[in-house]
Every structure is written in C-alpha cells, then in structure tokens.
Amino acid sequence: MLSTKVTPSGVTTQKISKGITFYVNECMVPPASTGPAGRPRPLLLMLPWLGSHTNAQAKYFEMYLRAGFDVLVVESNVSTFLWPRWGLEYSLQLLDLLESERFSRQALLIHAFSIGGYTFAQLLFHLSRDVERYRGLTNRIQGQIYDSLVIGSLEHMAIGVSRNVFPRFETLVRCTSLLYFQVFKRQTVDYFNTSIDAFRNTPVTAPALFFSCDNDALSDPESLQELQEYWRRRGITVVSKRWAESIHAGHLRVHPQEYLSFLDNYLCSLKMTPLKAKM
C-alpha cells in the first residue's frame, strides 16, 4: 500500500498502486441482505472513464459505500490504450490483486464507464485464455454494469480518447491516433480485436445492465443493440436503459431519478444491497 487515510465520514482510502484505489466505509456493518453474519461485503470493481477526477468518481462510488459495498477503483490510462500489451499486463496485475487474500472471498460487481469497458475486456482476455484457472473468480462476478460503453469502430475508441483526455485538440489527436494504429497495426489493432472478441464472447454470464443514449458519438447504437441481442441468445440476462438524449458517462447527472431507479432495481434482482434506502 502506498498510502492510507481515513476521512471524517469514516471512509478508509488505500492507494494500492498508481491508478488503483481501495475504499472501505468503516461505519457500515455487513447488511443482513448480503448473507450470514461474517460473510464478506460485496466488492464493486469500478472502471471509470479516461481522465476522470476523484470528485467525479465519488458521485458513484460513495453511494455504493453507503449501500454496504467495498469499492476498488481501477483507472484506465492512455498508455495502456495506445499500447495494448501494456494494458494486458495491467489487467493481469489486477487479476492477481482480485485473487489475493484480501479480496478472494468477496462477490464482485463490475461497473465500467466508457473506455473502462475496454479495460475490462482486457481482463476478460485472460479469463478466456485460461477458463479453469480463473473459474472461481469468474463465478464471483454477480453482475456487470456498462455505462456509455465505447463500441463500434476503432474510430469510436480514438474519439473517446481524444474527447475525454485531450478535448482542446480532439480532431488532431483522433487523426494522429488513427494514423498510429494504421502504422502499428500488429501491435495495436490486432490486440484490440482480440480483446473485443473476448468481451463479445465473455465467460462472465452474470446479468448485465447497460446505460446508453442515441446522441453518443462514442457509442454506436446499432453495434450496442447487436451485442445485447447476441448476449441474450447466449443466455445472459440483459437489461438496458437508453435515452434519446443524454451525455456520455453523464447519465446520472442528466437523468438522476431514472438512473438510480434502474440501478436499484437491477441490484435488487441480484439480491445485492439496494441503493435507495442508503442514499
């Protein structure tokens, strides 16, 4: 652990490594709905959007803390996106962490935003490569939530990086990124396709919730709809909330009541702690 601190509200923050932070609400006891006394609290694995700040992330993870979850925030970064092999190494380190003694007994809920879904896809690549090795971890995943999933062409991913990290130079960064991918196709595009295939054919069959909107330039509605139908044919329960107009990775801010209602109903269906009583 690089550092540990306790806030006045009783939340312990542990900086595990650069980009990985663990939050625990010490004031919460395991709620009865999570199971027998002594059972570990569920763990939220939160994969935020590129360039997000702690204050923006806190709007999400604080409500999970109040609901009785521990929270592990794993940030994406530009380097692992531009050079996917580093991303695969990063996701392998995350797998080791999730299987460590500290986290190995906790049920998992995934909440990925934007390109955070791609970070999770890199983790799924390892799960798919060695199904038996990671079967225990895969079975611990009880739910998966995707908010503004970046999906469609490689250009959608390039737009996502440029708009979230370099908004003042969006066009330049997008064009430069696409040229870079063309030049280093074997080291980038081929890896992207492999991870995207691992996401599409995920070994995780837990119920999924999608939040999206039609005016999101980073997420192609037709591609997202096709993915959801494909998962349904595979037997995965899929619930979705799609708005005509909203903001990429900002649905909670634009549509707070609908967002929380869908999220609460989804968690109730998983028999995980509902959020409404804890807000």
Image (cartoon, grey):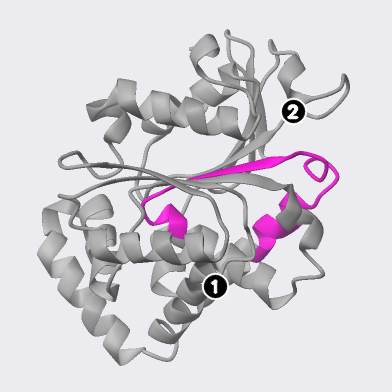
Residue 82 in which image quadrant: bottom left
Q: Locate residue 162, reporting x and y percent.
A: 23, 60
Q: Which mark is residue 198?
A: 1
Estimate how packed mark 2 is, as few (under 14), some (14 to 19) or many (20 or more) residues with alpha carbons within 10 Å.
many
Q: Locate residue 92, reporting x and y percent.
A: 67, 65
Residue 108 part of the magenta segment: yes
Q: In this view, does 93 lie above or below 60?
A: below
Q: Locate residue 26, reporting x and y percent.
A: 70, 15
Q: Which amino acid does label 1 sit on?
A: Ala
Q: Which mark is residue 41?
A: 2
Q: Which amino acid does label 2 sit on?
A: Arg
Q: What residue lies at 36% left-to-right and 52% top-to-bottom?
A: 114
Segment colored magenta: 92-117
Q: Total label count?
A: 2
In the structure shown, which secondary structural element does the residue marked by tag 2 occupy? loop
Residue 224 part of the magenta segment: no
Query: Residue 279 versus residue 230: which sits nearer the camera?
Result: 230
Q: What residue lies at 44% left-to-right and 75% top-to-bottom?
A: 83
Q: Is residue 209 above or below residue 77?
A: above
